[in-house]
Amino acid sequence: GKMSFKATYLGSNGWIVEFKKTKIIIDPWLKGDLVFPLGGWFFKGTLKDEIPTPQNINLILITQGQPDHCHIPSLSQLPRNVRVICPKSANKILEGLGFSNIKLMQPKDKFEVDGLRIEATSGAPVPNIENGYIIESNNGSFYIEPHGFFDKSIKPRKLDAVITPTKNLGLPVVGPFVKGVDVLPLLVKAFEPNYILSSTVGGDAKFSGILNKFISIDEFKEKLMCQLIDLKKMESINI
């Protein structure tokens, strides 16, 4: 069949999705460490290899305002006139970096740009509700949400690909905060994707700090009626 788009995994939450006219970068972590506000003793991520700044990006898509999605050293590498779509939690950060073309989206909002129809869906409560996105075009379609939270108000439809965590990450007492295992059957039912692209828990980053010692990982055991693809960092697939 016709090639509709190409997806490249950047590791962690990061992706590049290339349609005919539009090259989208999503939640990129390209260089520098990942540290949460409490500091490195609590949680710190370090990349094995930095990723050279991708060129010719037309759209920056941010799902959450947390530093593992809205990563300042990485976003600082990108031209400030590129259009950004983001939730409210990331807006101030992006404005502070000097991005001048920001479109705020909240769940249920719809927006069209460059032949893409973009719909924001309700994502993870961390603690405010963050975004997932459905992106549809005449050259293909995909859904992305990085924590495995499913928006029950989404109208089911056929999509080519779903980018989602496929594992559960959990903490004692709190339970799972990334719910890939739980959400997979719901996503398959809602979107009947040809491909599921495993996200969030891949790449070459090394993590340290107190929090990391307590994180447990659960794998998905059932059989799915679609292809589950686990790309390594900087690997691509044509959908």
Image (spheres, helix red, strand yellow):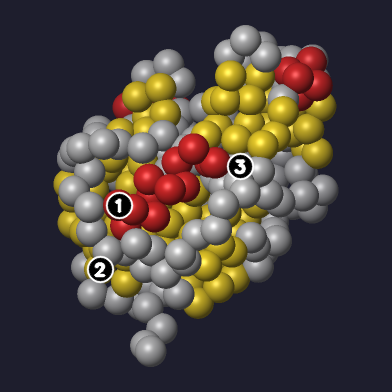
Task: First in sequence, mark 3 or 1: give its number.
Answer: 3
Which residue does the numbered mark 3 point to in the structure image? 167
Q: With respect to residue 54, does 128 lie above or below?
A: above
Q: With respect to residue 180, does 237 lie above or below?
A: below
Task: First in sequence, mark 2 or 3: give its number.
Answer: 2
Q: What amino acid does circle 3 point to?
A: Lys
Q: Are marks 3 and 1 in contact (CB under 8 Å)?
A: no
> In the picture provided, is 116 more to the left or to the right than 127?
left
Label at residue 137: 2
**Residue 92 visible in the shown view:** no
For disc 3, the neighbor class at 10 Å (few under 14, some 14 to 19, many from 20) is: many
* Residue at 27% from the left image edge and 64% from the top image edge: 158
Q: Measuring from the top left, give residue 117's x and y in whole percent.
A: 21, 59
Q: Nearer the viewer, residue 143 or 84?
A: 143
Q: What amino acid does circle 1 point to?
A: Ala
Q: CA distance from mark 3 to mark 1?
A: 19 Å
